[in-house]
Amino acid sequence: MPIPLLIDTDMGVDDAVAIALALASPELDLRALVSTGGNVPLEQATKNIARLLHAIRPGHWPVVGRGLDQQGPGLHDATHVFGMDGLGDCGIPESGEVEVRGYRDAYGEFLSGSGELNIVAIGPLTTLAAVLRDDKTARKRIKHIYIMGGALWCKGNIRGVAEFNFYRDPAAAAAVLTSGLPISLVPLDVTKFVTLDESNLAHFAASETRAGEFLAKIMAFPMQHSSEAGKGRFIVHDALAVGAMIWPDLFVRTQMTVEVATAGEHPGQSRPTLAHGGPQVDVLTAINAVDFLENMLERLCEEKEFVT
Ligand code: RIB
Ligand code: CA
């Protein structure tokens, strides 16, 4: 039985890889996509969901919801990495066909659905934290939450201290991580080991699948502009949050309490604590990156056309 899934996303290029992987995976049933501001402003993130679905899953889209943005003054975005439009500034067509609802409606419909309801959060946790705060029944209906975020032992990607998703909304990250819900956290410590290079893009382009051709186009910009993994390489952070659902045996994990700084010199900085008694989360601490990359490339490049 495919696992029912809602993805909450700030719709940069690695978010698109994660969503394409979910759509190509028979183990998963992607029922809803909700935008959150982060890599790009909320409206652009919402448009990018429609652009992605139009490109790789025309006419068969999940529920789409518009979430929340962060209000803090002077917050970095990630347009320098993903382009002004968040999807590599490569002219991916807009799509007006996708109906966009409010996030409460989109989450509400998903959480009233059947099966073991899983959420993957691959942007700032602003919208998810609002849902958990306002919808008191949500907690009982969520089976598991997978979060890409945090930098526990390695350097962060924001001023070398915090990780971007937690930096954009530290209070939301702290609230979700201490909610007591079943959570698997996929931090930079693990995601930084899974990078794509130009040869992978060439493979995508030659795959003759909608997903492969779309991803080859949008990854060209970050491949040249992202400095995280060096020139010509691109870290697909968010794909690991989806991959952790599909290939759990490729990861090493441990239970711990994770604290997120919500004030002080480095808001968004995350650290494991030895404090006893706090809500624990499942932290992914190591990955078989070679096998993960091979599995992901195969899944995306040999994606079976969507059968109506
Ligand atoms: O730090 C990596 C995270 O920040 C990823 O989710 C990427 O899309 C950006 O949102
Ligand atoms: Ca993201």
Image (tube, grey):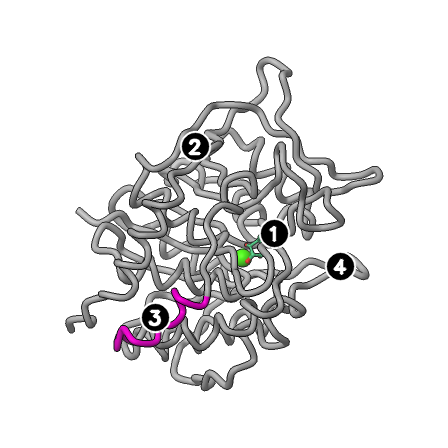
Mark 2 vs 3: CB contact within 8 A: no
Q: Is residue 179 above or below residue 12?
A: above
Between the C-alphas of marks 2 and 3, the distance is 35 Å
Q: Nearer the viewer, residue 155 or 231?
A: 231
**What residue is rendered at 54% in x and 33% in y?**
179
For numbered disc 3, what is the local secondary structure? helix
Circle 1 is placed at which residue position?
A: 126
| Residue type, label 2 | Pro
| Residue type, label 4 | Leu
Is 278 colored magenta in this rendering?
no
**N-terminal-most mark, 1 or 2:** 1
Q: Is residue 35 above or below residue 85?
A: above
Between the C-alphas of marks 1 and 2, the distance is 18 Å
Percent position of residue 70, x then y: 68, 58
User: How many neighbours does mark 3 have within 10 angstroms: few (below 14), some (14-19), or many (20 or more)?
Assistant: many
Q: Which residues are magenta?
A: 198-209
Q: Nearer the viewer, residue 280 or 302?
A: 302
Circle 4 is placed at which residue position?
A: 75
Circle 3 is placed at which residue position?
A: 204
Q: Is residue 197 left or right of residue 279?
A: left
Percent position of residue 215, x then y: 40, 71
Q: Nearer the viewer, mark 4 or mark 1?
A: 4
Between the C-alphas of marks 1 and 3, the distance is 33 Å
Q: Main secondary structure of the magenta part?
A: helix
